[in-house]
Amino acid sequence: MVRSVDGFSVGAGWGTGHDTGMMLSVDDEQNMTPPEVARRIASMFDTARHISGWETAGEPGGRWGQAKVCRIRPHRVLHVIGASEMAERLRAEYAAGTVAGWSLHPMPDTRTPLHYYRDAFRALDERGHLTGYKSLDRHGFVWAEEVRACPDDALRAVNGVGPGRLDRIRAALATDIAPMVEASSTMDTAATPETATPTHEADVTHARQAASRLRERAQNLRDRADELDDTAELLLRLAHRA
């Protein structure tokens, strides 16, 4: 069986090695420390064999979590996305210049959860679908700032994002929404959508609006359930008369 690991098609259970070109088992890959992963990823972007727009670091259920990295071409600059410890550690490695010849792509000091823009994505779709948003979410984007900082060629390399959806993504994220938190200066207190605390009045308003939409949706579901009950009762009566 063949599987893709970090942009290469290799035998099941194996991943690509770094500078030496030796093969690494997937277990060995997961046991690598973030500094080792940072060097491996930079090495992958250095090779002419690299064809993928993105490199994956770690696993969602792994010790450090998962992050994804793309290169800001033609520069030797790497953009890291994700809210995991792996993502924070990779950012720290590249920002500190510990991986020779590579640097970190800068982002603003704010962190706005991508899901804050769900309504903006729906508003741009004739049927109210989350076109574009779902592709970003599945790929691992967590913060709106990550997407804004991502170059077009890297976004087009995301599965499900084409020219039309790219324009829609840019338009949706141009919506003026107050950031949720300031970016943490330390990894131990890095904010995630689950742990961050809203610090702006607009966030409270956003939460109230979301709660109102949920109440409205619940009421609609109850109304539909009542209609179904009435329909079922009518069918039972007709069945008895038959």
Image (tube, helix red, strand yellow):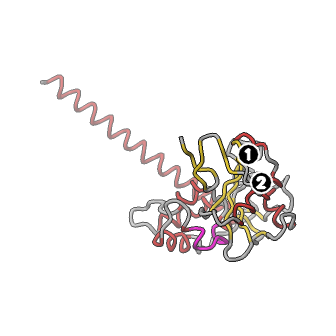
Left or right: 137, with 230 as reference point: right
Q: Position of residue 190 (x, y in %)?
A: 80, 56
* Numbered badge on residue 131: none
Q: How many marks?
A: 2
Q: Amino acid at mark 2?
A: Val
Residue at 76% in and 72% down: 106
Q: Nearer the viewer, residue 79 or 121?
A: 79
* Residue 171 in view in this figure: yes
Left or right: 102, with 170 as reference point: right
Left or right: 231, with 7 as reference point: left
Quarter of the rendering containing residue 83 = bottom right
Vertical order, 237 against 8 (above or below): above
Q: Nearer the viewer, residue 29 or 18?
A: 18
Name the residue beneath numbered marker 1.
Answer: 29
Q: Amino acid at mark 1?
A: Glu
The stretch in magenta equals 147-155
Left or right: 235, with 52 as reference point: left
Instruction: Please report contact status of discs 1 and 2: CB closer than 8 Å, yes or no.
Output: no
Regarding mark 1 in the picture, which secondary structure is present there?
Answer: helix
**Residue lying furthest top in this view?**
240
Q: Position of residue 79 (x, y in %)?
A: 71, 66
Measure the alpha-carbon separation of dots 1 and 2.
8 Å
Regarding mark 2 in the picture, which secondary structure is present there?
Answer: helix
- The quarter of the picture where the C terminus appears is top left
Q: Nearer the viewer, residue 14 or 208?
A: 14
Q: Earlier in the sequence, mark 1 or mark 2?
A: 1
Residue at 61% in and 56% down: 7
Q: Looking at the magenta stretch, what is its main secondary structure?
A: helix
* Numbered badge on residue 37: 2
Residue 154 located within the stretch drawn in magenta:
yes
Vertical order, 182 against 167 (above or below): above
